Image (cartoon, helix red, strand yellow):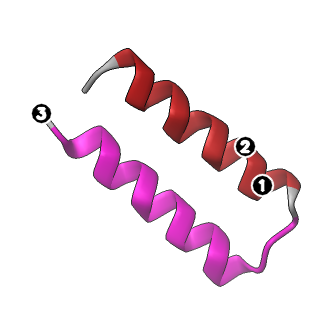
Amino acid sequence: LSRANFRDANLRSAYLWKANLSGADLQDAYLESADLRGQT
């Protein structure tokens, strides 16, 4: 996982968190971030 992708995933997660999305949306964002971290 490249540093750029890791940073982008963190920024996207932070944006979604601050946007006060619903629990389902936050869960989707978390799962997406987990998928990104799982990539080799």
| Residue occupying image coordinates x 86% and y 52% | 18
**Distance of mark 1 from mark 3, alpha carbons?**
26 Å
Given the image, on which type of amino acid does mark 3 rest? Thr
Disc 3, disc 2: CB below 8 Å?
no
**Which of the two labelled residues, at mark 1 and mark 3, occupies the earlier sequence position?**
1
In the figure, 18 relative to 10: above or below? Answer: below
Q: Is residue 39 above or below residue 6?
A: below
Above or below 25: residue 10:
above
Query: Does the CB distance between marks 2 and 1 fall below 8 Å?
Result: yes
Q: Residues within 10 Å of mark 1 (few under 14, many from 20)?
A: some
The N terminus is located in which quarter?
top left
Contact between marks 1 and 3 (CB within 8 A): the answer is no
Where residue 28 appears, as percent x and y from the top left, is: 52, 72
Say if the magenta span includes residue 1.
no
Residue linked to disc 3: 40
Magenta stretch: give its range: 20-39
Q: Amino acid at mark 2?
A: Ala
| The C terminus, quarter of image | top left
Residue at numbered disc 2: 14
Q: Identify which residue is drawn at 73% across, 57% down.
A: 16
Task: Please name the predominant secondary structure of the magenta segment in the image.
Answer: helix
**Secondary-structure class at tag 2:** helix
Q: Amino acid at mark 1?
A: Trp
**Residue 24 image offset from top left, x and y in percent:** 63, 82
Residue matched to label 1: 17
**Displayed quadrant of residue 38:** top left
Quarter of the figure with residue 27: bottom right
